Amino acid sequence: MTDLPGPLQAVDENARLLARQILSEARSGVLGCLGADGMPVLARVAVMADRNGRPVALLSELSTHCRALRADPRGSLLLGEPGAKGDPMTHPRLTVSGSFHAFQDPALKADWLRLNPKATVYINLPDFHFWRLMPTSGLMIAGFGRAYQMDPADMLKTPAA
């Protein structure tokens, strides 16, 4: 692509590696979806990447954001934490957009508990389910003046199945 809109740069291998790193290291993010009234709903949620690098969240059916995703699975996750020092706006972050789908995976449950041992308190409650974000696009801000519009293949370890 030679004519990129606005401040976007062409995606290169360094941008791909950074996006995959953000996805693999993320332990929380901000989930955005549409509420029943059409207004945005935002929630901080625990996340991890599945073996293909797609983001997964463990959500309670009692939450507003989970009910919203049941009605309309479109949503986004903002991933990437500001560093301890400096301007938060200069630290890399990635917004992954697509559709969320509930699923069960006993192997992922074990991985989740290794990363989040305190989740043993609620992971087996009947209202908690895993939700996978199937990415359709991403927007990565890699620092000041470094923005990239990304496809799933740019962000994921392997293409989404």
Image: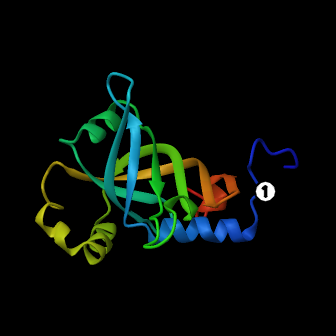
- The number of numbered discs placed on residues in the rendered structure image is 1
Residue lying farthest to the front in this orientation: 86
Q: Determine whether, in the image, residue 96 is placed left or right of residue 67.
A: right
Residue lying farthest to the top in this orientation: 37
- Residue 154: image quadrant is bottom right
- Residue 75: image quadrant is top left
Residue at figure coordinates x 48%, y 70% from the top left? 24
- Residue 69: image quadrant is top left
Q: Determine whether, in the image, residue 115 is placed left or right of residue 16.
A: left
Task: Give the residue number, with chain letter if any, for mark 1.
Answer: 10
Residue lying farthest to the right in this orientation: 2
Residue 47: percent from the left, percent from the top? Answer: 36, 61
Q: What element carries label 1?
A: loop
Residue 142: percent from the left, percent from the top? Answer: 63, 62
Residue 153: percent from the left, percent from the top? Answer: 65, 58
**98 and 37: which is toward the camera:** 37
Residue 73 appears anywhere in the view? yes
Residue type, label 1: Ala
**8 and 58: which is toward the camera:** 8
The 10 Å Cα crowd at callout 1, few under 14, some 14 to 19, many 20 or more, is some
Residue at figure coordinates x 45%, y 59% from the top left? 55
